[in-house]
Structure formats: structure tokens, C-alpha cells
Amino acid sequence: MRQTFDETTDPSFGAKHLPRVREQLKAQGLDGFLVPHEDEHQNEYLPAANDRLAWVSGFTGSAGAGVVMTDRAAVFADGRYTVQVRAQVDANQFDILSYPDDVPTYLARAPKGAVIGYDPRLHSPDALAGLRRAANKAGAELKPVEINPVDAAWAERPAQPQAPVVPHPDDYAGETSASKRARVGQGLDDAGADAAVLTAPSSIAWLFNVRGGDVIRTPLPLAQAILKADGSARLFLEPAKVTDDLPSWLGNQVSLETPDDLPGAIADLKGHRVLIDPAQSSAWYFDQLEAAGATVVRAADPCALPRATKNAVEIEGSRQAHIRDGAAIANFLHWVATEAQQTLPDERAIVEKLEGFREATGALKDLSFDTIAGAGPNGALPHYKPVTSTIRRIESGSLLLVDGGGQYLDGTTDITRTMAIGEPTVEQKDRFTRVLKGHIAMTVVRFPAGITGHQLDALARLPLWMAGLDYDHGTGHGVGSYLGVHEGPQRIAKAVNTQPLLEGMIVSNEPGYYKPGHWGIRIENLQVVTPATPVEGGERPMHGFEALTFAPIDRRLIEVGLLTPDERAYMDAYHAEVLDKIGPHVDDDVRAWLEAACAPL
């Protein structure tokens, strides 16, 4: 079972640690200290030992930041965590502000001459640049520290995870590690680099075809690696994580070393051109490389793009994982449509029910993220999670939004469904159908090579825009193959993204609508970019999307009159495919319900 901070923690949990941190600030001559959510590997999800922001503040969201000054403190959280952050953080001790926009604003108000410390192991150079500009504006100084004041104050800090690192068979990976290393190494050579320093656990897991258990919700090993242009590599792992079969799995071109060997290995790069990602790797590595006399080549993680473009084996694995997961979802939706409509359970019971159906597959390795279940007004918070003070029961006449996913050896899933509890209102049906129209548009679109997710994003929003409506989150994120449920570099959002959508990339399709204080709607499937093929009568080959997620969409919430004939035909075809793929994997009573849920509109 994962070790993490209890999300029902009393707000005094974090506040009581502030005096201890301030003692450390005084000892180091600091007026403040930056506390990012990210750890030494820039992870989204953290082992308990690295969840410094949670220990300092009590806030356990997957994104955010903190600043501790000698006389005040602040926690920064985005709109996904509006309810959660106020339930977990003592507002008498912390200002609760918006992330990320308010962080530089807060630093820009620092006292003139203030010295604010930061741990260079926890911040990327790109992130630090903006924070340093804000501090300089106030006449304050950002100063790197050797000893992290939070770590020094955290006497009861848990031990670092030591989960075994195991082979991820080629039957799932679809390409050997040697082939990947040769391919990425050639890319380094083409870029004029002799080597690359890799610090992202997802890249290391992908490159060496290994998986671990150091990070909750993602099967990652905490490690570092140096890859050379000839395909050889040095992999730095705690010895306790090295399983008996790992050395032979890695082969003779990979030397297994310990993290204590890493500084010496960086020193060995003197005189070499070394590629490292300034958005992903921490400032410490850049400082060490420059001190060693290496020439730093600032460029994107060379594993990121090949990791994102899935091969045929990974895509087929994702299809199979989604069928398995889809059966669990069908069982859950059947329960919501029958028993739950009568018993009106609370959100925590709903989460446990869905997770139970996933566990019953016998193939679940972990959730891909903590399950979101929002009843009524809580569903209007896009990434709400049930915490003690806010848990609600579902109510007749409202909506239930559930977003969850699973980690399976052959794929990672992520699905959102919104369900009517009782009879839906006219307004609920109108908004749901507009979200559905945007979802369909993002499914059936064809697009030429070079198109980015940013350029497609408006298609999902147009039916809402035409009614003066919108949503404030992105439309789609990349998804890994038994790796992170959030994976770049691709995404679909209003924000500009220069990465084209390439064949084999898996993205989510999740438009939504949220009525604050009442209910929320989101429909999410995963889909994969298909090869560019000719269009009848067209002049250029076009990419498209293949749906991976198969589960019924609540027909009671669809206002059929708002759909075009093509949209109705799409829904009927999609539901027919759901029944065909999922029907054989559920019991007779669920199959009977599924037939009705997937009936033509």
C-alpha cells in the first residue's frame, strides 16, 4: 500500500511545522525559502519522503508550491484544488493563492534585500529564471542552498523508497532497450552531442525497458542515467532496488552504478558536449556539468518524443487494456444506474466501488491517479477529490462526475463519465449535449501532418462557445504506455504548443462544462493518432484518431435534437462498438443493461 499524507489531515498538520522550518532559515541566514511540489526528478506524483510541500503546509495536491518567510507563508494551488487546499491548509498561517500565476507576484513583493533560499535539486533552470526575475524586481536575492531547510527540519521524514526495479518485457514494450538506446544515441550524434544526462524517471523506465514502484500511481524507478551517442549507458540505481535478473536484462552496454557515483560520472564528461533538458532536469545538474568543464547543450529530453509515439505493440496493448478496463467501467456504470440510484451513496463509497471493479480484473497494478468523484456541486470542481469536510452523497436531480484510470502492464487508462441521478433537467441535457458535440468533433476530425493540439482545441469548444459557454482546462493530454497518465510533449489546449500530433501519440479527449455551486460535466476518452491516409476526393493524406476507450455515454443526458445526423450516426456506431467489445466480458445482468445503454438513439 502506498505511503502518503492523509488527505483528511487537520489543517494544523502543516502549520505546526512552520516554526521548525523557520529555525533552519535563521540558522542559514535566510529570510525565506521556496518549497516546490516537485522533487529531484520533477515528478508529478511523489513518494512520501519527497512530498515536502505536503509536510510544510498540509496540501497534498499534485501541483502547487509554497513559500515560507520568517514572518509569513503562502501556498499556491490551481483551480483543480480550490476546495481541497482550503480543507487542508491553515488559512491563519498561510496565504492561499493561485498557482502558478501568483508565485512570481508574491516574490515580487518580498522585502528589499531579502535572501530567499532554494534547493537547486528541486527546480529546473527554466522555472528558476522566472522566479529570479520576480525576486530581482523586489530587490531580493534567490540563493541556492546546500542543506534544504525543510529536510533539516523534518526529523520524522520517511525513508526513500527502495522498490525493486524489474524488466518490462519486450512483449509489452515492442522494442528492445538496445534498439532504443541506439536510436536515441544516433539522435544525440545528429544533434552534435556526445552524451545526454537523463533525470526523468519516465524516460529511464522507457529507455531501459524497466518499471519500478517508487512513485505512487506511476510505475517509475527513481534513478538517473547518462546515455552516450554510441548507445552505451550508465544507470544510477540504489543497490537495494537491483533485482537478480536486472543486470542480465540490461546487458553489457549498460553499467549499473549507485547514486553516489553520479557526481564522479558527471565529472568524467569534461570536454564533452552534453545534452540536458532545462525544463525537466534540475539546476543542480547544469551547475555540476559547467563546473566539470562540459559543454551544455540545452535541448528537450531526447526520449520524450520517441516515448510519446507508441509502436504497434504498445498501441495494441492499450487496446487490450481498455477493453479490460471498459468491462470494469461497465460494471460500475451498471451499479450507478441501478443500486446507487436507490441507495444514494456518498463520494467515498463511489470511489471505492469503482476501484473495486478495477481490482477485480486481476490485472490492475495500480490506479493511474487518485479517482475523482464529484456529486452535484463538487462535480463543478474539475479535479475535486473527496476529503472529509466536503464529501457529499449523490442526490436525485443532480449529476455525478467520475474520472479515474488504471495502470496495467499493457497500457494506462483514463476515462471520465457524467451520469444523471434521477431525471435530468432541460439545462443539464443541453449542456451535456454541447459537451458531447465537442467530444465527437475531436474524435472524427481529420488533419494534415504538422497540425498541433493547440490548433484543434477550438473544435471541442465550438458548441459551447456558440451558447456563450466554455471550460477552463485543457482538452487533452498525452498518456504513457504503462507509464504516466500525463505525458508530453503533446497536448490539446488553448495554450500554444508547437509539438505536432504524430502517428502513435495517445491523447485524451475531455471537453467539459461546469456550473459552479450546482454540477459539472466532462466526457473523456483516450484516442490514438492514426497514420496519414488519403481522403476520398481529397488532395493530401490526413491523420485522424482511433478511439481506445469503450464505455457507454449516458443516453438520458443526450438531447438528440441538438445532434446532427452525422453526430447521431457516430454515437450509434460508437455504442455498437462498446457493446461488441465489452459485452462478452461482463455478466448477463450487466450485459442486458449494456444492451439498453448502447441502443441506437
Image (cartoon, rainbow, N blue to C red):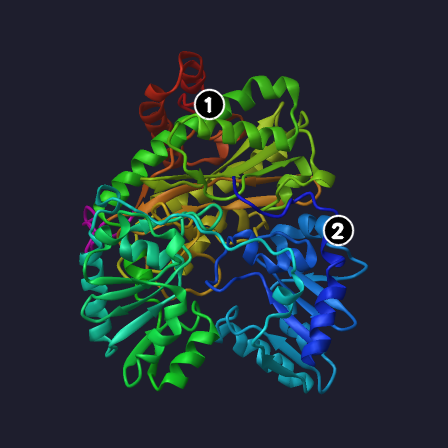
Magenta stretch encompasses residue 505 = no
Residue marked by disc 1: 331
Task: Say which residue appears at 35% left-offset and 87% top-offset.
Answer: 293
Q: Position of residue 423 (x, y in %)?
A: 62, 23
Ranked by sequence position, the earlier of labels 2 and 1 is 2
The picture places residue 495, in percent across and down from the top left corner, at 48, 63
> Which type of secondary structure does the marked residue at label 1 adopt?
helix
Q: Which residue is mark 2?
A: 11
Which quarter of the figure is the C terminus placed in? Answer: top left
User: In the rendering, which numbered label is found on residue 44?
Assistant: none
Q: Amino acid at mark 2?
A: Pro
Q: Residue furthest right?
A: 92
Tell me how far mark 2 sits from mark 1, CA to CA: 37 Å
- What amino acid does circle 1 point to? Asn
User: In this orientation, which residue lies closer to the viewer: 494 or 313?
Assistant: 313
Badge 2: residue crowd in 10 Å (few <14, some 14–19, many ≥20) = many
Question: Regarding mark 2 in the picture, which secondary structure is present there?
Answer: loop
The residue lying at 73 percent from left, 67 percent from top is 73
Give the image location of residue 455, x and y in percent.
40, 60
State whether the magenta stretch is mostly helix, strand or loop. Answer: loop
**Image position, residue 145 (x, y; %):** 58, 77
The label nearer to you, 2 versus 1, is 2
Residue 502, above or below 322: below
What is the magenta range?
531-544
Residue 302's image quarter?
A: bottom left
Tell me the quarter of the picture where residue 63 sits: bottom right
